[in-house]
Image (tube, rainbow, N blue to C red):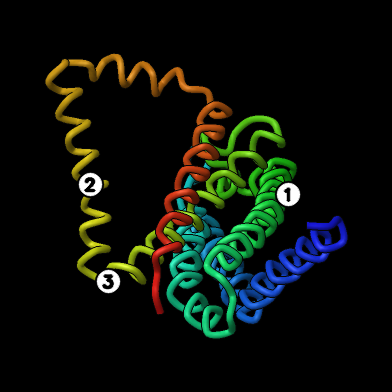
């Protein structure tokens, strides 16, 4: 193959990946406004509740409501497999191109969204918890530390959430509802077996010690590695999907 043919092929692949990304962004409401709209609504509700509490706790207000953005990333990931994949394949987009284009888009969105979360985290600290010592974006241990660590953790968790949803959606497209239940049950069984093994070895003290001593930066890197493994599982699954 000549250099010109190779360059044309690479340009064609890049263009196809770009078309997949634009296909997803047709649903801008789901990828942007819905995610941040729900998070904003959750934030406002928490602020309203905190504001009417007559005696705030000395340590400030804490909430786990930030979890909503990760839940919606899972939902969007499922939709990427169940809603957009069949349409893309009818347009002649290959499974490989669709998967790569989807992952490229998601990596870009997660980088942007992690930056927004980090900015809100910084503002929350600058304003002493929005003036009422509230901790919405500053989640203890998880989103705690220097800004770059918060950004990395946010990115890893967002990407892992979407890719987990994408893989689940791809399993549903290939194996149906029963296969998806078996797929999810497999992870539950693996967790139970692991817990039984730890109990049998009487190793829970070592496990708790490991979790207490775990550095959040190391945990974020592990989440990133897990996201890579999940994406590999999704890629192997999409190769056999028929529409």
Q: Nearer the viewer, residue 219 or 176?
A: 176
Q: In this orientation, does residue 82 appear?
A: yes
Q: Nearer the viewer, residue 3 or 239?
A: 3
Q: In the rendered view, tell whether residue 100 sits above or below residue 41.
A: above
Q: Which residue is mark 3?
A: 176
Q: Which mark is residue 188?
A: 2
Q: Residues within 10 Å of mark 1 (few under 14, many from 20)?
A: some
Residue drawn at x 71%, y 35% as measured from the top left: 148
Of discs 1 and 2, which sits in the foreground? 2
Residue found at the far front of this picture: 1
Residue 12 falls in image quadrant: bottom right
The quarter of the rendered structure image containing the N terminus is bottom right
Residue drawn at x 27%, y 71% as measured from the top left: 176
Q: Residues within 10 Å of mark 3 (few under 14, many from 20)?
A: few
Q: Are marks 3 and 1 in contact (CB under 8 Å)?
A: no
Q: CA distance from mark 3 to mark 2?
A: 19 Å
Q: In this orientation, does residue 53 appear?
A: no
Q: Where is residue 98 drawn, in percent x and y?
A: 58, 68
Q: Which residue is mark 1?
A: 119
Q: Where is residue 164 drawn, in percent x and y?
A: 43, 54
Q: CA distance from mark 1 to mark 2?
A: 36 Å
**Disc nearer the start of the sequence (1/2):** 1
Residue drawn at x 41%, y 21% as measured from the top left: 212
**Disc nearer the start of the sequence (3/1):** 1
Q: In the rendered view, tell whether residue 193 sits above or below residue 66.
A: above
Residue 6 falls in image quadrant: bottom right
Q: Residues within 10 Å of mark 2 (few under 14, many from 20)?
A: few
Residue 197 falls in image quadrant: top left
Q: CA distance from mark 3 to mark 1?
A: 41 Å
Q: Secondary structure at mark 3?
A: helix
């Amino acid at each position: 193959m000549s250099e010109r043919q190779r360059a044309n092929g690479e340009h064609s692949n890049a263009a196809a990946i770009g078309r997949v990304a634009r296909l997803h962004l047709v649903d801008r409401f789901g990828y942007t406004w819905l995610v941040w709209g729900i998070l904003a609504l959750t934030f406002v509700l928490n602020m309203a509740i905190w504001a009417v509490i007559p005696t705030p706790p000395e340590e400030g207000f804490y909430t786990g409501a930030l979890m909503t953005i990760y839940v919606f990333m899972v939902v969007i990931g499922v939709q990427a497999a169940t809603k957009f994949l069949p349409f893309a394949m009818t347009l002649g987009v290959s499974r490989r191109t669709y998967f790569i284009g989807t992952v490229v888009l998601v990596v870009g969105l997660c980088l942007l969204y992690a930056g927004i979360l980090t900015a809100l985290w910084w503002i929350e600290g600058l304003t002493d918890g929005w003036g009422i010592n509230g901790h919405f974006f500053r989640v203890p241990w998880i989103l705690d530390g220097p800004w770059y660590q918060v950004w990395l953790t946010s990115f890893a968790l967002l990407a892992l959430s979407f890719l987990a949803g994408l893989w689940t959606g791809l399993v549903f497209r290939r194996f149906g509802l029963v296969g998806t239940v078996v797929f999810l049950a497999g992870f539950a069984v693996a967790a139970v077996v692991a817990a039984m093994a730890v109990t049998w070895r009487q190793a829970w003290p070592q496990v708790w010690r490991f979790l207490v001593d775990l550095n959040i930066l190391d945990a974020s890197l592990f989440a990133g590695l897990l996201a890579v493994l999940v994406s590999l599982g999704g890629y192997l699954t999409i190769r056999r999907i028929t529409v």
